[in-house]
Image: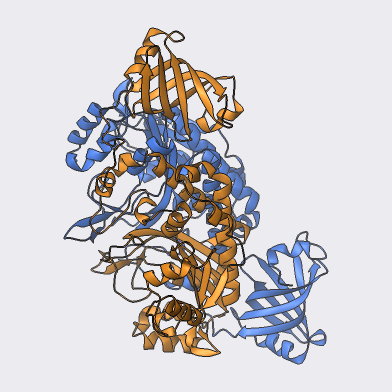
Chain colours: A blue, B orange
């Protein structure tokens, strides 16, 4: 019977067939040990020359790193380690003997590994990251369904920019028109809430940004959520519930993977509502104390975020930024109209921004004024302004950057490993 | 207490607050009926002049179509109809009185409706379609997780075409390079199976195709799945299980929405394994009987698919197409090397292709030969060929077109309504 390595615990003492790859091979005399992986997990197959036929022994001893194999055997429990199992082989078939594998045990530089991304994905660390990413994605879908958010796929091709025209990728559409690749589905979701009440999208977005940092990719995945009848405070409540649920799911379902990454899970176990909430003014004061020269009405830079989040033991909302540094659609704070009802959610341990959100301006006249102040093409925003003419409601939303959340939860220094095939300034391949 | 209309059944006799939009309004004398929707469902609020204060009565009677309102009241069960509830209003607040709504009860042409897509989404039919689309998406994620498929997000920016260079959108990348927008994540998933065993992606794909048909969009969503150690027959088993699960989830969770669309659910209730399986040769023979002039080694056209699927009462696999009309990566049928181990899955009731899949060529030499036969740039496929050098395994996969599945399950004649903001030859807005 075919059996995934991850299910060995249910089949101790039973004969099974495992199909996978030899991660490593060593033999001494009449015994060979094949480190085996099948996509679900890792195990060791023990092949004893006396217990298998000649063809099997030959297959086992000629298997190279990353050869594909089919191994029949009996599942045995490790005599000392709990939840560790081995396969006592009864037959070994070599499907394809791999050529000398380019990724060895020595240290490789990031360029070499990224050039071989199609193979590097097989490394235990990369396997673990992708499975954690998968769990973060599923947790998001589950949470959204359980909280009445409907998936609304915003378009990728857009006729104009959501927040200005810089850093946009341009495409020749039909009839001599230009299309631009989306940077956020938000405006479209604002239309959809008047149909479905609450909605989210989750798809790729694109930034033609020439900066090389450990937090930026040219192509990355973003989850936008938008809800009618939710105000600024309610918006933060939703975010902290969602993020706490995601972290909880990873801790429950991906313990093995976190161990492979040597991730200290203590800071993750601490992630539960309420998160810290401070104002931008408080953040600036704190940063000045810590030695930053950030000004009262400045946006936070990446260094500021790092500095600040090292001071906190769980995620931190910074709310009410100066209107001047934020997008046109954010609703002003009535108690201080120079500020907006927004929040950035910063992950602890120096990770910085993972979510940006705000209550949206729902008043037609105020929004028209903002569009003009920002010198945006008014005709292109007619449909968006329409939403304030036909049943406008208070509403809020936010967007999370998947790769930043993966990097934080996995404890990675750079986002480039968080996505299967990263697209960087100098990298479009494989 | 705030209560979604969809949860009225649990709150009969209780005081609730509903926040939503007045879908329609009529009043006669001292009673007003507000047709109300809140994104979760539809209900009627009954406002009696005697039972509410003056401000509430004024709000109720001045509400226009698509005004936003907050109504407090008591949930009551319809005296005759099961599972139908009303709201006996005690207070009405008008949040924003909508201007005259452009979409009326008269028939509008598709261009007008698509120009107003940001508002048209609110129509009950469009609400129902998007909620069914949401359920199809969630069902897919659930099924994939339950069957050990890991989500692997294939890149959108690709350096070359998967199946030739026609119909590709081109983007200026950095350093004078061109990138192309993906048409399928398949090749990347083939790399990832050697890490995670089984995987899927689910994202937007792009086709710069000038044909206008009821089955085509410029930008649409595709789910690709790929599995190691699965052969052609196993590949079809996976597809019929997945599709049956999806249809079952819609039937269970979206009865109301199917009713709004007046969808005959009988054909959907019939969707369970096994699906019909015929060869391409059998399909051609059948089509010739039915009057089509399709040749022995021709691909099926859309008309052929429509003609054929009207003859079957559940989905139909057509397998083993001529190699000449299919992609280079498909494995040849050893019993007839002019044919490939592929299958197209056709939805019944005239809908036609919803999935294309195949076993993939896993032999290095055979694949190199195919790349050359198809005049593909060999250097660009080096990484893909690598997968056959390091632990090649038999493997198969398939891709489904989300919008075609939505169209079929909803019983829609055209895919343009199946996606929130369709992108067509002449349409990039809103």
Left or right: residue B156 versus residue A174 is right
Q: Position of residue A254 (x, y in %)?
A: 62, 54
Q: Is residue A292 left or right of residue A259?
A: left
Is residue A122 visible in this depiction of the protein? no
In the picture, measured across the screen, residue B190 lies left or right of residue A250, that is: left
At horizontal 36% and vertical 50% (from top left) the residue drawn is: B417
Residue A93: image quadrant is: bottom right
Percent coordinates x, y for residue A373 in the rendering: 18, 34
Q: Left or right: A410 with respect to A384? A: right
Front one among B403 and A65: B403
Residue that lies at the very extreme toward the bottom in this rendered image: A54
- Image mark count: 0
Image x and y of residue B228, in percent: 58, 73
For residue B413, which quarter of the picture?
Answer: bottom left
- Image quadrant assignment for residue B377: bottom left
In x, y percent, where is residue A283?
40, 32
Q: Nearer the viewer, residue B29 or A251?
A: B29
Asked if B382 appears above or below A284 in the picture, the reply is below
Given residues B120 and B28, the one toward you in this image is B28
Q: Foreground residue, A145 or B179?
A: A145
Q: Is residue B338 above or below residue B20?
A: below
Camera sees residue B419: yes
Measured along the vertical axis of the image, is residue B140 above or below residue A119?
above
């Amino acid at each position: 019977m075919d059996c995934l390595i991850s299910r060995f615990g249910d089949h101790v003492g039973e004969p099974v067939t495992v199909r996978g790859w030899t991660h490593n091979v060593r033999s001494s005399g009449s015994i060979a040990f094949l480190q085996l992986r099948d996509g679900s997990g890792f195990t060791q197959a023990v092949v004893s020359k006396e217990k298998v036929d000649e063809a099997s022994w030959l297959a086992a001893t000629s298997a190279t790193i990353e050869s594909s194999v089919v191994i029949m055997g009996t599942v045995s429990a490790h005599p000392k380690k709990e939840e560790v199992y081995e396969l006592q082989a009864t037959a070994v078939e070599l499907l394809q003997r791999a050529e000398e594998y380019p990724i060895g045990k020595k240290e490789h530089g990031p360029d070499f590994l990224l050039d071989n991304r199609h193979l590097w994905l097989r490394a235990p660390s990369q396997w673990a990251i992708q499975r954690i990413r998968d769990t973060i994605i599923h947790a998001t879908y589950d949470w959204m369904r359980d909280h009445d958010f409907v998936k609304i796929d915003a378009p990728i091709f857009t006729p104009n920019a959501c927040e200005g025209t810089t850093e946009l990728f341009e495409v020749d559409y039909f009839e001599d028109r230009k299309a631009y690749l989306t940077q956020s589905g938000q405006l479209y979701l604002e239309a959809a809430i008047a149909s479905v009440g609450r909605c989210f999208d989750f798809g790729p977005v694109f930034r033609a940004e020439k900066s090389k940092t450990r937090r930026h990719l040219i192509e990355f995945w973003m989850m936008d959520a938008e809800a009618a009848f939710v105000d600024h405070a309610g918006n933060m409540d939703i975010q902290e519930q969602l993020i706490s649920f995601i972290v909880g799911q990873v801790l429950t379902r991906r313990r093995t993977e976190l161990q492979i990454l040597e991730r200290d899970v203590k800071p993750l176990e601490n992630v539960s509502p309420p998160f810290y909430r401070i104002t931008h003014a408080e953040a600036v004061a704190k940063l000045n104390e810590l030695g930053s020269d950030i000004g009262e009405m400045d946006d936070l830079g990446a260094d500021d975020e790092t500095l600040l989040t090292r001071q906190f033991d769980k995620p931190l909302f910074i709310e009410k930024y100066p209107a001047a540094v934020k997008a046109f659609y954010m609703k002003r704070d009535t108690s201080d109209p120079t500020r907006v009802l927004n929040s950035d959610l910063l992950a602890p341990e120096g990770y910085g921004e993972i979510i940006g959100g705000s209550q949206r301006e729902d008043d037609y006249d105020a929004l028209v004024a903002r569009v003009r102040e920002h010198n945006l093409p008014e005709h292109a925003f007619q449909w968006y302004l329409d939403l304030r003419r036909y049943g406008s409601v208070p509403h809020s939303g936010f967007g999370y950057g998947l790769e930043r959340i993966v990097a934080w939860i996995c404890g990675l220094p750079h986002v480039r490993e968080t996505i299967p095939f990263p697209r960087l300034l100098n990298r479009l391949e494989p």
